[in-house]
């Protein structure tokens, strides 16, 4: 099929590349000319495991192309994906100006039937607005479909190629048939394509993310409570996770959720609730608890240093909001660093992928180490903020030689308590006994 993907951010790029992989002709459109030039020469503008390989392959096969010319791309395509940014506006609601701006242009461009697909996470009612914006200028028939994307950073390629489900919001039989055909190769294992109306599809995305954010936040509160009463959150997690109604996944407590989706989507759904006359009480609590959780490690560090962090050298392992990405949006590490600096500490950080992005924001406010052990050199304490695989099995005796004090504040519960006791570390984690 001939496809145009408008917007080459995270979702657009993965969507375009993975659609080309199954033999479609894909052209990705972006207004950023220098980014388009880079992509044409095979450079993937984001870090995402496995994306580079299929990106290169499909460019070589000439199934994946890039342009800044919206008009020519759209004219040749039968299906047009809108993967445009929907950043939070000042009041927290999703800003639709990019989506509606392109919709307005589409109406002027299209000369035959097109399926226009909202791939971005957009509030309930957006398909209707996009339809109206296109219809204002269009002289031909078209359908607007909501097809939210559920991919996770770090697993984006796999999530797209083998999705748990594909959600398609449309009541048009013509669009339904085209999309059934398009997604057939991706659901061969028997996972469902779930058809529904546009509004339900739009809400499905927000409900999924808000539910997962709530699940994590609930566990974070249970973990905080465990610390107060001397219970072990790992035990509680195993105990409740074996109940299939609860499930084992997304029960890992830590220093809060971050990233480009959960914080933005929970906020946007909360805002939509207020606008619709149904203010969600649970989402307000989730946002508040998560914000506090991001720096919940701080009082523990202060306690250890008797309230004085001045000139203390703190090593940080992990800056990205989660492993296998260079994304630092809403990353807890940045909040912790900010608070440490405010208290007069100096910070040396190491992250396998995200240091470039952090240096653009923090510059020389912190030091950047070449590797995880170099970050720990002469440090008074080590803080773990992201669970990169490389941090899971460090050489503890090598680490001990680097650190000034054998002190670890682990925001991701990477190590066994028994092991840390044996190694003689002061080890503070989330929802578990302090090893001192
Ligand atoms: C999420 C959704 O999973 C995905 O379906 C949607 O399309 C976009 O948002 P992503 O933001 O890439 O994906 O990351 P995810 O792996 O879901 O993690 C989100 C946040 O939750 C991270 O900050 C992670 O550290 C945190 N998390 C996750 C926990 O704190 N505990 C858990 O048990 C799981």
Image (cartoon, helix red, strand yellow):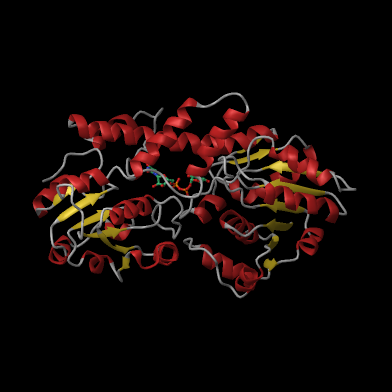
From the viewer's perspective, tell me whether residue 65 is left or right of residue 305. right
Query: Residue 435, relative to residue 219: is it above or below?
Result: below
- On the image, the x and y values in percent for residue 165 come to 57, 41
Q: Residue furthest right?
A: 139
- Relative to 272, say whether 363 is above or below: below
Residue extending farthest to the top is 277
- Residue at point 50% right, 49% down? 260
Q: Could you tell me residue 64's position as x and y percent?
A: 66, 66
Q: Quadrant of residue 59?
A: bottom right
The residue under the point 36% across, 68% down is 364
Please state which of residues 102 and 163 is positioned toward the viewer in this rendering.
102
**Residue 316 visible in the displayed image:** yes
Residue name at image x 60 percent, y 34 percent: 203
Residue at image location 65% in from the left, 43% down from the top = 147
In the rendered view, does 329 fall on the left or right side of 297? right
In the picture, measured across the screen, residue 392 lies left or right of residue 269, that is: left
**231 to 65, vertically: above or below:** above
Q: Nearer the viewer, residue 330 or 161?
A: 330
| Quarter of the picture holding the N terminus | bottom right
In the image, residue 35 lies at what x, y percent? 61, 69
Residue 181 visible within the image:
no
- Tell me where residue 235 sits by quadrant: top left
Q: Quadrant of ligand 1?
A: top left
Residue 366 appears at what percent x and percent y? 32, 64
Query: How many numbered marks appear?
Result: 0
């Amino acid at each position: 099929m001939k496809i145009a993907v408008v917007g080459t951010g995270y979702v657009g790029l993965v969507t375009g590349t993975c659609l080309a992989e199954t033999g479609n002709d894909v052209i990705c459109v972006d207004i950023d000319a220098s980014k388009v030039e880079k992509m044409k020469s095979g450079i993937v503008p984001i870090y995402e495991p496995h994306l580079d390989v299929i990106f290169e392959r499909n460019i070589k096969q000439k199934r994946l192309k890039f342009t800044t010319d919206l008009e020519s791309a759209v004219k040749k395509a039968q299906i047009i994906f809108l993967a445009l940014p929907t950043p939070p506006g000042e009041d927290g609601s999703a800003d639709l100006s990019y989506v509606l701006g392109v919709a307005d242009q589409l109406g002027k461009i299209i000369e035959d039937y097109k399926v226009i697909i909202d791939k971005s996470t957009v509030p309930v009612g957006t398909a209707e607005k996009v339809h109206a914006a296109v219809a204002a200028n269009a002289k031909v028939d078209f359908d607007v479909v909501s097809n939210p994307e559920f991919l996770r950073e770090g697993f984006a390629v796999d999530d797209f190629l083998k999705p748990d489900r594909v959600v398609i919001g449309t009541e048009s039989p013509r669009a339904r048939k085209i999309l059934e055909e398009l997604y057939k190769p991706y659901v061969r294992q028997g996972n469902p394509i779930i058809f529904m109306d546009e509004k339900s599809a739009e809400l499905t995305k927000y409900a999924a993310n808000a539910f997962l954010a709530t699940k994590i936040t609930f566990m974070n509160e249970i973990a905080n409570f465990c610390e107060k009463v001397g219970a072990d959150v790992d035990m509680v997690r195993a105990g409740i996770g074996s109940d299939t109604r609860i499930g084992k996944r997304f029960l890992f407590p830590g220093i809060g959720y971050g990233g480009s989706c959960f914080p933005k989507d929970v906020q946007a759904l909360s805002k939509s609730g207020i606008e619709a006359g149904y203010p969600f009480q649970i989402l307000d609590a989730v946002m508040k608890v998560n914000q506090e959780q991001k720096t919940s490690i701080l009082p523990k560090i202060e306690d250890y240093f008797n309230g004085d962090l001045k000139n203390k050298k703190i090593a940080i392992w992990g800056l990205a909001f989660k492993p296998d990405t260079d994304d630092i949006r809403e990353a807890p590490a940045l909040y912790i660093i900010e608070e440490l600096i405010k208290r007069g500490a100096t910070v040396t950080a190491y992250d396998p992928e995200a240091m470039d992005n952090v240096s653009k924001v923090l510059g020389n406010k912190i030091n950047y180490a070449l590797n995880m052990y170099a970050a720990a050199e002469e440090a008074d304490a080590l803080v773990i903020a992201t669970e990169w695989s490389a941090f899971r099995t460090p050489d503890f005796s090598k680490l001990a030689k680097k650190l000034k004090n054998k002190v670890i504040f682990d925001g991701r519960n990477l190590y066994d308590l028994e092991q840390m006791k044996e190694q003689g570390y002061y080890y503070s984690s989330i929802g578990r006994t302090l090893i001192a």
